[in-house]
Image: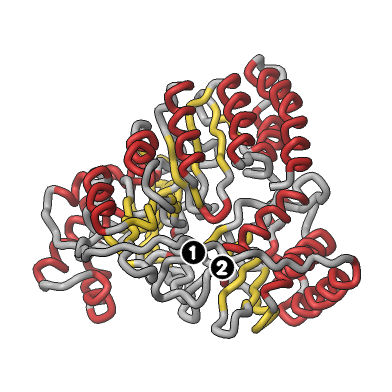
Amino acid sequence: MNKTLVQSFREDIPVFQEKIRAFEAGEIDKKAYKGFSGGFGSYAQRSNGNMLRLRLAGGCISMEQLKFVADMVDTYHIDRLKMTTCQTIQLHNLSADATVAIMEQALEYGIVTRGGGGDFPRNVMVSPLSGVDKEEIFDVRPWANAMADYLLSRVKTVHMPRKLKVAFSSSAANSTHATFRDLGFVAQADGTFAVYCAGGLGPNPKIGVCVAQSALAEDVLHYADAMIRVFTTYGNYENRAKARTRYLQESLGVDGLKEAFQKALEESFAAENLKVFPEPIVCEKTGTGNLIHPRAIAQKQAGLYAVSYHPIGANLAPQKPKELYNALKDIPCAELRIGPDGTLYIINLTAEEAESILKITADGAKTLFETSVSCIGATVCQQGVRDSQGLLAAMVEAVSKENFGDGVLPKVHISGCPSSCGTHQIGSMGFVGGVKMIDKVAHPAFTVMIGGEDAQSAEQFGTVVGAMLEKDIPSFMVELGTAIQQANSAYAQWMPTHKEEFEAIAGKFLVK
């Protein structure tokens, strides 16, 4: 990262320090503080303490960065770490002094918090196994890293209506949702990118509009510049509820958006040279041995494996960064990657090395259902409506007593509010927090959705089944799992041919 840019971020920190202390002293209200602090990647929590979001391009964590996180946990007695659906790590329950100190020290390790929230370009997302995935088209990380540096360079120079999320996908799995982000790049077989823009989850979700079928990889920054030009020209600065790129599909129309994008792209090419030719990211390591384990993934590099580890709710135990660092520090090429679903991948391991990491990570999810996705929820988030983490914990506890086979229940996606931080709209089953009025009394409830899909060329948003009271959802999952187990099937195979049975089971728990 550019040293001058890092220094400019460092020089901003005293201003943040002044604001956070004024907020804690009651001199600034929550709304005003939120509007300021988000630009530094920090928010005040609902009840007390602060959150700080560590921006990690593509969710990649080096050994030095892992040690930094472990040291911060020890130094500031951090008791909660949450991996997010944007491939970042959130540190929770921080004092004002700890927030400022960590923000500053993180810069020494190439970790920036600036622009981690607020109306800024957010963390650049990358397929978590890019570079090691046998099924990938090509490794997109070099261009994603160039994009991350470029967007950081514009954090202080452009005023956008709202946040801009950029994602790269190296395969059809499309785990980063590149085809429905504000700007998405999908690897093509000829080394180019298909480019999508103005997509997004949340209220009024949209699949992105394809504005290029085969963009030269060297031109990715020009496409980002064009998207910023379109957004700042046509984006809604007056109404925050509609100040996201996906609303450009409505205000400009799809054809109008394509035309505006192409014009902006031409302007970008004429204005300056943003072409990039990044060096490939290479690990020369190979391995021997053979490993068969549900959480071991054979890499495309001969004899190497990745280990998947999904802490329930993507809540990383405070001691885990140190445990992982001590186990990995002497392993050549070892690296961590955060997936968009909160799964942590430890890559570039020999079979023997992978076996040791499998033991350290044995406390994670054991089934597909336990890898379910959840945002941080309303106990922490000021915007939250429902306790999504609490619902997930209650479901896991209820289901664990039934000994269902792996796959009997699907991975579910839970958001505490319509913002879709839990990506509820693209899960095979999703839950979004809300309220249900019964006899003029408000009850905690979640709307249930089914049928979401994020795979490239098969994208679709889930359809609404109805609302369930929060307290009844664990029982619903148990009854659903029982029916599927008795059919000796799994949800993915059972659901397409048993929709009436699903509706009958769900109907017992839906509230009018």
Residue at the spot of label 2: 140
Disc 1: CA contacts within 10 A as few (<14), some (14-19) or many (>=20): many
Q: Quadrant for residue 257, please give it.
A: bottom right
* Whether residue 55 is situated above or below residue 229 in the rendered picture: above
* Whether residue 225 is situated above or below residue 337 in the rendered picture: below
Name the residue at 40% across, 28% down. 79
Q: Quadrant for residue 245, please give it.
A: bottom right
| Drawn side of residue 416 relative to residue 225, left or right | left
- Tag in front: 2 or 1: 2
Mark number displayed over residue 127:
1
Q: Are marks 2 and 1 in contact (CB under 8 Å)?
A: yes
Type of amino acid under label 1: Ser
Element on which disc 2 rests? loop
Element on which disc 1 rests? loop
Name the residue at 35% across, 40% down. 324
Q: Nearer the viewer, residue 488 or 353?
A: 353
User: CA separation, marks 2 and 1?
Assistant: 8 Å
Q: Nearer the viewer, residue 336 or 487?
A: 336
| Residue 425 image point, x, y percent | 46, 63
Give the quadrant of the C terminus.
bottom left
Name the residue at 21% across, 52% down. 475
Residue 395 visible? The answer is no
Q: Nearer the viewer, residue 13 or 510?
A: 13
Q: How many marks?
A: 2
Type of amino acid under label 2: Val
Name the residue at 65% across, 79% down. 210
| Drawn side of residue 230 relative to residue 348, left or right | right
Residue 428 visible? The answer is yes
Q: Nearer the viewer, residue 393 or 72?
A: 72
| Residue 248 image point, x, y percent | 73, 68
| Residue 420 image point, x, y percent | 51, 55
Disc 2: CA contacts within 10 A as few (<14), some (14-19) or many (>=20): many
